[in-house]
Amino acid sequence: MYCSFYNGLVVREYTVETDKLVEGQTAKIVLVSDLHSHMYGKDQSKIVSLIKKRNPDIIALAGDIADDIEPILGAELFLEGIRNIAPVYYVTGNHEIWTRKSDEVKEIFRSHGAMVLENSYESISINGVDFIIAGVDDPDIVVYEQPGLNWQEEVKNSFSSLNSQPEYLILLSHRPERIDFYRELPFDLVLSGHTHGGQVIIPFLVNGLLAPNQGWFPKYAGGLYRHPEFNHIVTRGVSFNPRLPRVFNPPEVVVINIISCQ
Ligand SMILES: [Fe+2]
């Protein structure tokens, strides 16, 4: 048990089941969000070794790995540390869009081995099973970089061909609050961040006090939410800001095991 202001990293593990895998088939994803370029040990050694130990098949970065104010070096060191552990997939969060230079940020991420998903998707075979991993730009791109863009239409059109795909479909999208929109998309699993766990948790009573774009007592502050159409995992992220303590809400690296329900 950690004390209320514990700010060391913890690992939180979830298991989701699917009939798209047959008995014995599995895949393991490590999900990281909201680093905001914070440093975990020299050259990010603490967070990198923690991820390496979990031996993931994929590393999914759900946005705000870099920041609009902090230097990007922390994000770059993190990317260098994880690039040879497993394929790395990344989407922007609002803070990367707020730089107003998200194309430059994406280029830097690519230069460190990450695959940038920008309303696009990639196929990947894991342990002999085919998966599709897709991702969207943070919707603040409309406000800061592409005024006039219909973000929802753009996303829908980008993924319309996936409806009939037999593969297990994963979507990386920074924002957890767009839940009604995700219902309209064909994905089996959606991975989000952005909330920082709602900053304050009161064990057994309150799962998050305040989160951006959700307000007080956010419904999707962090956890595994099982919807009829898809599973949604919201990580509380690895943000650490000494001016804004996390209470009963340590920074977390999430491990997701996808297994067969057959
Ligand atoms: Fe965010």
Image: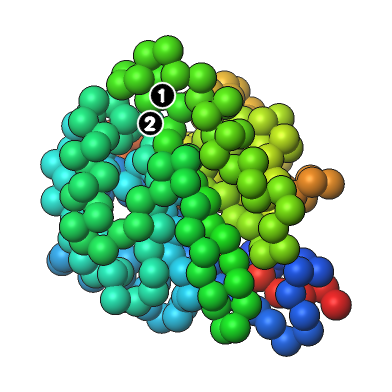
Q: Residues within 10 Å of mark 2 (few under 14, many from 20)?
A: many
Asked if ligand 1 lies within 8 A of label 2, the reply is yes
Q: Is residue 113 above or below residue 188?
A: below
Q: As shown in the figure, which amino acid type bears the numbered disc 1?
A: Asp
- Which secondary structure, mark 2? helix
Q: In the displayed orientation, state which residue is furthest to the bottom.
A: 24
Tell me where residue 245 sits by quadrant: top left
Residue at image location 72% in from the left, 63% down from the top:
166
Q: Residue at x 44, y 19 (%)?
A: 149
The location of residue 70, given as percent across then percent down, is 18, 38
Percent position (x, y) of residue 51? 39, 72
Point 62% across, 77% down: residue: 129
Distance, label 1 to label 2, CA atoms, is 6 Å
Whether residue 249 is visible, yes or no, is no
Q: Is residue 174 left or right of residue 214?
A: left
Task: Report the residue marked by disc 1.
Answer: 140
Q: Which residue is mark 2?
A: 94
Q: Is residue 161 above or below residue 214?
A: below
Q: In the image, residue 224 lies at what x, y percent?
A: 68, 52
Q: Which element is circle 1 on?
A: loop
Task: Look at the numbered discs 1 and 2 and tell me whether their residues touch, using CB distance below 8 Å.
Answer: yes
